[in-house]
Image: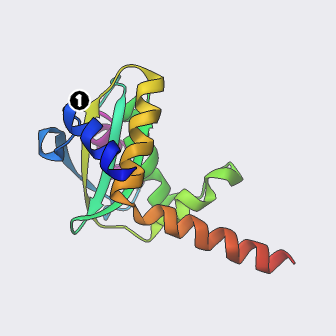
Amino acid sequence: MLRVYEEFLLDNEILPLNNWNTFESDHKTEMTKGTRNLHTINIRNQGKNIAGIYIYFYDNICLYVGESGNLGSRFKDHYNSSWRKPKLERRMARHLFFKEYREVLSVKWIEVDNEFDRRVIEGMLTRLLKPTYIEFRKNRRKSVKITYQ
């Protein structure tokens, strides 16, 4: 099945990833009153009001694959996840994950307007690239189950 996904993504010019927009997202810079606003504005402006799919990398390792109707806001959310505990419990895994990667991360993104297309492509890329977040989340769920039993 993975070969079918790869062929589909190549045929539709989603792959190779070197065709995607790229920027460096500095998750090392701590959120402080003076720097936070300017820093998060710069991150948010990368894909402001653009719908699409994005991938975070660190040292050429795929960390996270996602999709959003507003990439700029999502990039800012991921940066904030590095430094701020979320208000919603369902976002805790993402917070703990990005907190471990307070580094300069490489972000690739591509515009995809249709929400259904974004979700399908995100799923295919997740299967192909095997982001470390998937394993992190699985391990976290196991430890939470063990803790509460």
Q: Is residue 141 visible?
A: yes
Residue 88 is a magenta residue: no
Left or right of 32 in this view: 138: right
Residue at the extreme left of the image, as rendered: 18
Choose top left, top right, bottom left or bottom right for residue 85: bottom right
Q: Is residue 117 above or below residue 94?
A: above
Choose top left, top right, bottom left or bottom right for residue 93: bottom right
User: x, y percentage for residue 110?
Assistant: 25, 34
Residue at horizontal 36%, vertical 47%? Answer: 125
Nearer-the-camera pick, 128 or 17: 128
Q: Which residue is mark 1?
A: 12
Choose top left, top right, bottom left or bottom right for residue 51: top left
User: x, y percentage for residue 24?
Assistant: 20, 52
Residue at horizontal 39%, vertical 61%? Answer: 130
Q: How is the image coloured?
A: rainbow
Left or right of 15 in this view: 100: right
Residue at horizontal 33%, vertical 25%? Answer: 112
Q: Which residues are magenta?
A: 33-45
Main SS category, magenta section: helix
